[in-house]
Image: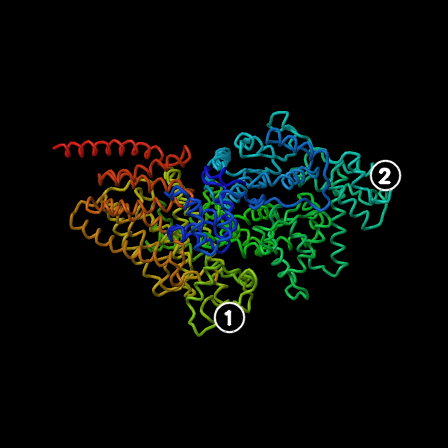
Amino acid sequence: MNLEDTEHSDPPEWLRVAANQLGNKKRDVARALNLPNATIEDIEQDCRGNAQECSYKLLEAWYKNCSIDDKLNAFRRALCKCDLKDLANRLSPRQRMPSGSIKPISNITPNVKDYKDTQDLKRCMEHMEQTKFVALTGLSGSGKTEIAKAYWNRKKDLYDVGWLIPSESDQELRNSLLLFQERLKSFTVDPNQDLPDMLSQVNSEIKRDANRKFLLIFDDVTDSTQYVIQQGFPPSENISVIITTQTSHPYAIKESIQPINGFTEDEVLQFLEELQDRREMKIKLWEEMSHLPSALACAKFDINKLKRDIDHYLKGIKHKQVYRMMERRDRGILGNSYKKTPIEAHVQNVRTMLDELKADGLPKLCMVFKAMAFFDSKAIPVFILEDILRLVDPDADMPVESMIDELLNKMINRSYVTIFLEDGDMKHRLVDTHDLVQLATRFEVQETSDHLKSLEILMRVLLCYFAKDTRYMSYFKINTLLMPHVEMVLEHVHKLDLSFEMKIMEIAMFDILGYSHTQSGSREVAEQKLQTGVDLVYKSLNMEEADVDRDISIKLRRRSTGMQSEMRVDDNQVTDPDEFAHEKALFMYEKLETVCDRVSNKFVANTVLNADDVAQMKQKISKDKKFPKLLSQDRIDRKIYDELVQLGCCVPEEKIKSIYLPELYASVFYTYGRMYFYNKDKYQRNTMNTNMLISAIRLSSALCKVIEEKTGVVVFHSILTKRNALFYLLSENKNEMGKEKSSEEMLRNLYQGQREYENLSKLTDNNDWYQHGILKVTKNDRHHKCVCTEKVVFISTRILKMEKDPTKREEVIKKGLGKIKILQDEVDLQEQGSGPGRTLHRGSDFYVVSAEFYEAAGEKYMQEAHDNYKKATGRFKATNCSQWKKYGKACEGQMRTAKALNMKDVLKKAKEEGDTYNLKAPADAPYKQNISTLTAELEAQMKSLSIDSSELDME
């Protein structure tokens, strides 16, 4: 690559080449390039877990904001300052960079062990060369996905990104796109939009990334997803697309459709060459297996393993009942024209696999193998498989990692799986398998107790990692990775007769799944999941919500009037909502006390701590105490849990028995109730929905209060229900009935909200707060104080926009200025990494809130407002502008306050920021129209200032 040829691209290719070679020097280089510390911190936070992409984003942020003409030599000088002279010399404009120096970003695994090139691959490559698009159609097991992967493995040098996107359902496609976005980190998708719009947005975003070439494989596309993919994701100059589907007539032009019919006669004879049997018998096997490579691979393996001829093998696998039972449950996987013999071949191969594990003295691995049948077929994390084995065989003689490797090797030899190393890291291995293998395995376990047992173990392990607080974890992407597997598990347990323990895990999974969809923006999907979780809560208690509510209402009315139980009460009498919630919480707590012992002890051991858990605990314990050594993946067992109890970092197990279920149910009601704040316009149109959601939050808060009253333990959701929900209502324009508040009521609520958040901020001075027995918030928690303080500033801004009394305004301004100073100091501490505080509360958001306060405070503070908007704009712009709404809001504020200040240099800089936003932002980006209007107004204002200046000079 000649760097002189790429110097004029924006950004140039040498930037990515260099980023790939910075290693652990990336931060030093960024500082040598005078990149602000805040920008470095933001990008490192966004790209955590992806060092190469982080390096590139740092260099890209510098490049886009650098005003020097000779950027390459400026960059080379920075490299020399950081002892990277060799790299600086290799970046000489007259030298060519070595080919293949940049490793593509990809999740596409290698081909299975028994894969053979076919004429179908050759035709696929010809299609792609001509049109950059092909739709591979054929039965499950015909080799469609393997051909798509083979194309990538041969042509990946042509691409910068190769990504396989499972697309069997709308939800799977949404999850896959989110994982793709999470990995690239170069744009943000709005997942709450319709699927066609979501696809079009992703297509537009990567089309804009013209310096990179993409291959996207939409795998297992069905009738429900096919049309939207082909309409929303057409190929382009830098995007190539492969679709794999069983659909007979995909929505594509005829020339782009390539039927995949499996092996030809010549290809199968070559594939079965090692079998010692007659040619006509190999042809018979080929025909019986419907020409399908996956079934033929199973047959070949078993014939060799069992040392039987083809005729004997075919007679031995005939089980008509097997096919009939499968066909009822899995028509979607098999398709309408699937013959039974290929399925029987897979079932037989699974049986020989299980027999081999037992014969090799590895019977415990059978349970892990069976559990794999209930995952999604793509990206199964190996660390989850290892933890399943730890539960199944806690006293294993061999290392767990070695035993799982043994299992995976056996599966690789059967062409069951391929393994992908995320970022080339052996600790982050992901396994892809095939639906047919999972289908055959599920048939083997469906008539045994292992069916429910393997599902129960899988659910327990998933819940160790799939957690609600991962928005604050350094490994937030784990939730995105696990979501498809949790969805699949819930689909499998949906119609089963579950034990009480499994019902509780099902509730927890729906709660976390709904929360995860909420955080990622999929609000409609989140509401469905959370409503299911609430329904399951009442079902687990064998009670109807309406019956419980009626009985409690009657009880409270009789208590308030002193009426006897046999007397009729007035149905129109209003019940205090907080009193009602507390009575209902007491009722639920007492009902749960009878079953708590059945579940708590199963969920304490093998809990996984996140980095923030560990930091909180280490902050709490005194320096003379030793923090216990954690197990792999930061797991804790019962022994470590007991040590943490002694250190005051965990709740004693006896108390956990009384806490676990009420706290879980509080979590379910809280997450469900918070849906109100994500879509207020929708819910406020229906008073019944509004009351239902806010009542759920009140019930959650009341359950937390009852837990504290009964056990003395303060649980985490007692903060959340107030800080992130009930106190929000005080700053809402409408009341709980959906009616606009009067000005007097609004002001009264705002002043109350100010006081409530100040008091809540002080609560952590005395209390520790726990979640499922684990310390979550310790005394003087910085993040909590930051959130509460920022909310005080926000409410103060609202007050200033309404308050007319000059004396009261001055008091509010004084308080707000003090809170901004406190918040500024806290954010500085966090972003500099000083002390034990977390870097969670991003400064860019703080600057916007502060700017809005200064702006509302009046003309006297307009310069401070402008400075804060300007800082926020710079931060959002430096993080690759992926947060268009926040970036647009800050940019608009900078332009608006510049207009008010009316200084030529300020106006010019603000207009430049507006031009930059309009140039970079998508057509439908928020604030774009407003910024375009302001750009014209600022230009006119600058001209006016120039005219005034020239007239003054003449005078």
The answer to whether residue 937 is above or below residue 756 is above
Q: Position of residue 354 (x, y in %)?
A: 74, 54
Q: Position of residue 499 (x, y in %)?
A: 60, 54
Q: Which residue was labeled with disc 2?
A: 281
Q: Is residue 619 visible?
A: yes
- Residue type of the residue flagged with mark 2: Met
Compared across the picture, whether 365 is left or right of 572 comes to: right
In-front residue for pair 693/794: 794
Q: Earlier in the sequence, mark 1 or mark 2?
A: 2
- Residue type of the residue flagged with mark 1: Glu
Q: Secondary structure at mark 1?
A: helix
Q: Is residue 531 visible?
A: no
Numbered tag placed on residue 620 in the rendering: none
Compared across the picture, whether 242 is left or right of 686 comes to: right
Compared across the picture, whether 652 is left or right of 567 comes to: right
Q: Which residue was labeled with disc 1?
A: 643
Q: Position of residue 771 (x, y in %)?
A: 46, 59
Mark 2 surroundings: few (<14), some (14-19) or many (≥20) residues within 10 A: few
Type of colouring:
rainbow
Residue 605 appears in which quarter of the rendering?
bottom right
- The residues bearing labels 1 and 2 have C-alpha atoms spaced at a distance of 66 Å
The answer to whether residue 559 is above or below residue 157 is below
Residue at the bottom extreme, as displayed = 624
Q: Quadrant of the C terminus?
A: top left
